[in-house]
Image (cartoon, grey):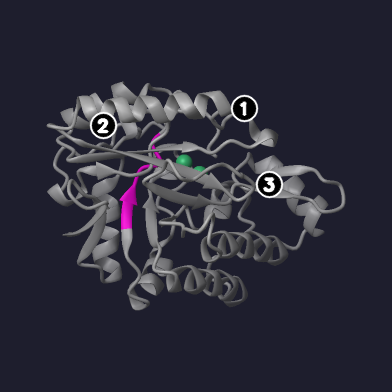
């Protein structure tokens, strides 16, 4: 979940010159959830950028967060609309029907071609208060103080263990295809500096979850969404984590977590450079013939 914000001043850092390998996005939100644009507007924009494929990943329904996820009725409309677009544009672009599945969501996964697994929330076991890991800086601080007694490592442990659980445990007989925004809890770090990403204790917690997720064969997204909104200068995961992933030979896919079409390919070239620095020479993308295909960076 990424609340609507004014898009950062560098919002138009779209890469008209981006490599052919990147002309695709698998993490795209529409007006069926909290995106600003219709699915068809996004398809047309993807075509104007020369994309070969576009995958939609509406937020899965769950009652506690109905303000940004797809409603049960909206979910059916979403599926029908994406299928309509698949047929209408099949000669020009491959459109895929995906879902961003939240940890707390229980929806039928059968209609979807691929699943992004994401943890956005924490439910305090005592107060039952529902917090967002990617909420405002104040909200994050409140969650840290009230649910974790100010212990940031305890918060990190809770977040990463939920993510590892979501990715490693089969959901309705299938596995998560893409690990969503791996280190999302660092979103407000520019404001509150609560997470020291170089702290070995933090890194150990994150690494164990990363390795557990990688062992399933899941693809890790290199998500530029926080860069588009001005929260961060680097994608999720950060460069060090990308190095860990490269060592583990984990596949990666560059995504924009797009909530507004101007950001459909935001900072893809920077993500590509970062992956080259981490040692990667190829990435996955949504293919025209196979669901995912490997392409050179
Ligand atoms: Zn998300
Ligand atoms: Zn998303």
Name the image quarter holding residue 266: top left
x, y percentage for residue 289?
17, 49
Residue 280 highlighted magenta (yes or no): no
Q: Looking at the image, is 63 positioned above or below residue 102?
A: above
Q: How far apart are the alpha carbons under marks 2 and 3?
A: 39 Å
Nearer to us in this view, 195 or 35:
35
Q: How far apart are the alpha carbons under marks 3 and 1?
A: 19 Å
Q: Is residue 32 visible?
A: no
Name the image quarter holding residue 90: top left
Q: Which residue is mark 3?
A: 140
Q: Which residue is mark 1?
A: 67
Mark 2 or 3, nearer chain start? 2
SS for tag 1?
Answer: loop
Start-end of magenta stretch: 253-258
Q: Which mark is residue 86?
A: 2
SS for tag 2?
Answer: helix
x, y percentage for residue 243?
36, 72
């Amino acid at each position: 979940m990424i609340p609507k914000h004014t898009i950062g001043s560098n919002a138009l850092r779209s890469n008209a010159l981006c490599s052919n390998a990147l002309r695709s996005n698998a993490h795209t939100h529409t007006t069926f959830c909290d995106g600003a644009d219709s699915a068809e507007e996004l398809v047309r924009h993807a075509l104007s950028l020369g994309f070969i494929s576009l995958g939609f990943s509406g937020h899965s329904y769950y009652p506690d967060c109905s303000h940004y996820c797809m409603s049960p009725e909206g979910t059916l409309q979403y599926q029908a609309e994406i299928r309509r677009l698949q047929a209408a544009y099949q000669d020009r672009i491959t459109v895929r029907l995906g879902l961003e599945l939240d940890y707390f969501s229980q929806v039928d996964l059968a209609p979807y071609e691929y699943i992004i697994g994401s943890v956005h929330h924490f439910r305090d076991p005592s107060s039952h208060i529902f917090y967002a890991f990617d909420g405002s800086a104040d909200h994050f601080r409140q969650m840290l103080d009230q649910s974790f007694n100010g212990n940031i490592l305890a918060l990190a442990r809770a977040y990463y263990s939920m993510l590892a659980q979501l990715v490693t445990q089969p959901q309705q007989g299938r596995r998560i295809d893409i690990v969503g925004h791996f280190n999302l809890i660092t979103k407000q770090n520019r404001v509150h500096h609560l997470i020291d990403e170089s702290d070995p204790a933090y890194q150990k917690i994150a690494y164990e979850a990363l390795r557990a997720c990688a062992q399933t064969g899941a693809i890790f997204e290199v998500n530029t969404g926080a860069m588009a909104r001005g929260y961060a200068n680097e994608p999720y995961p950060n460069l060090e984590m990308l190095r860990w992933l490269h060592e583990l030979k984990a596949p990666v896919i560059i995504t924009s977590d797009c909530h507004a079409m101007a950001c459909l390919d935001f900072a893809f070239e920077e993500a590509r450079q970062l992956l080259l620095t981490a040692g990667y020479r190829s990435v996955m993308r949504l293919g025209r013939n196979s669901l995912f295909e490997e392409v050179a960076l």
